[in-house]
Image (tube, rainbow, N blue to C red):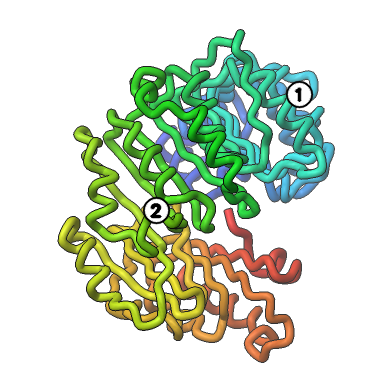
Amino acid sequence: MMVCIITDLPDLVVLELFSYFKPVECIYFFFDFDERWNSLLNEKQFVANVNYLSLLSSSTFDYICSRVLPRVSSNIISMSINGNFMDGCQLRKIFHNLSFSKLKKLKLLCVLEPDDFELCFKQTSNLTDLTVNNVNESAAEQFSSVIYKYLHTLTKFECRDKLNLKLNANCHYSLTTVTLCLQSICDLWILFNYLPWLECLQIGFNFEYKMNDDECSRFESCYNGSLVHELVPRLTHFKMISTMPQIDYSIFDRVIQSMIYLQSLSFDYRVHVSRSYHRSVSGLQLAQTLYPLANLTHLEFRLSVRVELGQDISELFLTYQCQWSNISWHVDDVTKLFYVYTRPWMKSVSFTIFDYDRSRNIEMNNFQDVTLLCLFTTASLDRVIKHFPSITHLKLSTTSYQSPSFSTMEERLRTLQHCVHLSIFAHFAALFRTTVGSFT
């Protein structure tokens, strides 16, 4: 009888075998069988792209840190770590005494200690792409200091947390792609002044932020729109998320019109209007705002406009439809907001519904492209899921702990997740955060 040893299997059979396991399982079961198997693991990018160091048992994590990482750290190109599923010291275990000389891309979620965060920089010499979100709020100032100490080494940076914008006039920054949560619209001028190589910019704002008269005056004095195309001549992609009434439309108009080289523009903007504007912004006004963007080839947006009782919504929508054919609208009677948005829906932007049953015209729209949905009431959850067939992330923001629907929520969410493969995050109770799923 012929005996076959697993290490003698042909390459194609081994690669087929890998397909039956998760990447971390392949590393745990098959790493160091021999050099050929290690080479095949590397061929599948399990060694070069390490995106599985979260949600591991302590024994598996310790094995990878003690046996695998010391052997492969110098070959790792990208790494993703979610601190939500790790002990505080585990980030230190990964980077302690190891050199990640080829690591170019690092994604960190939920980092507690600024010292551990800085260790990531110290142990990497070629890091150019950094994403860090959900840092410890109580140490935000220390995190800001670490980030801006090393920011000049990066070409791509993303952080959606509240950080103080500190840029050094003596540093030469090479950043081309930036995603930031700004503390003020005036910070935009700082970015333009210090980041001459900027090509893609995405900004958002804190929910607490709102321009006052002093800041409007400050913006008027510091923001020179005529110089923007000279300061950032490569800026071709811009995205802005401002879903609270934070920024006056006159400011929005001035910012957009200053970026004359834009090729791609995306915004999710809740209009705030001063006395110098009509209460609602029409499609014609928006078209005038976009008129200087002669190079614009891609436009996607959602505009949220406050409407008055008895206002003719169809007439307002017609002003947009005359400018763009690929748009839809609905009115939320809870918030008294008119939403007009382009189709298909924007990628990586959450579609928000306060009350599905009190939203006019919503059933007339096609939401096949929506993958992220934020829902503020669970009463119509089943109908919402049916109307949004492609959602992969559902964020439930209800705070009604005593409602009848809440008592049966866990079972309903389990059923939905099983049927339509949802990844669900509900922030109203820790129970659902752990037993239902996670919002990634």
Q: Residue at x 51, y 36 (%)?
A: 179
Crowdedness near tag 1: few (<14), some (14–19) or many (≥20) residues, C-alpha within 10 Å: some
Most extreme residue toward the bottom is 404
Read off the residue under disc 2: 276
Nearer to the camera, 373 or 314: 314
Q: Position of residue 3 (x, y in %)?
A: 55, 40
Badge 2 density bin: few <14, some 14–19, many ≥20, Cα 10 Å:
few
- Name the residue nearer the viewer: 97 or 190: 190
Element at badge 2?
loop
Residue 32 marker: none
Camera-side residue of 171 and 192: 192
Q: Amino acid at mark 2?
A: Ser
Residue 415 point in image, percent of width and height? 55, 79
- SS of the residue under disc 1: helix
Residue topped by disc 1 = 119
Kind of residue indicated by mark 1? Leu
Foreground disc of the pair 2, 1: 2
Q: Is residue 117 above or below residue 408?
A: above
Q: In this picture, is 101 found above or below 86? A: above
- Occupied quadrant, residue 317: bottom left
In this rendering, does residue 75 appear at all?
A: no
Q: Position of residue 428 (x, y in %)?
A: 70, 70
The residue at the point 72 percent across, 64 percent down is 434
- Residue 78 in view, yes or no: yes
Q: Is residue 264 above or below residue 146?
A: below
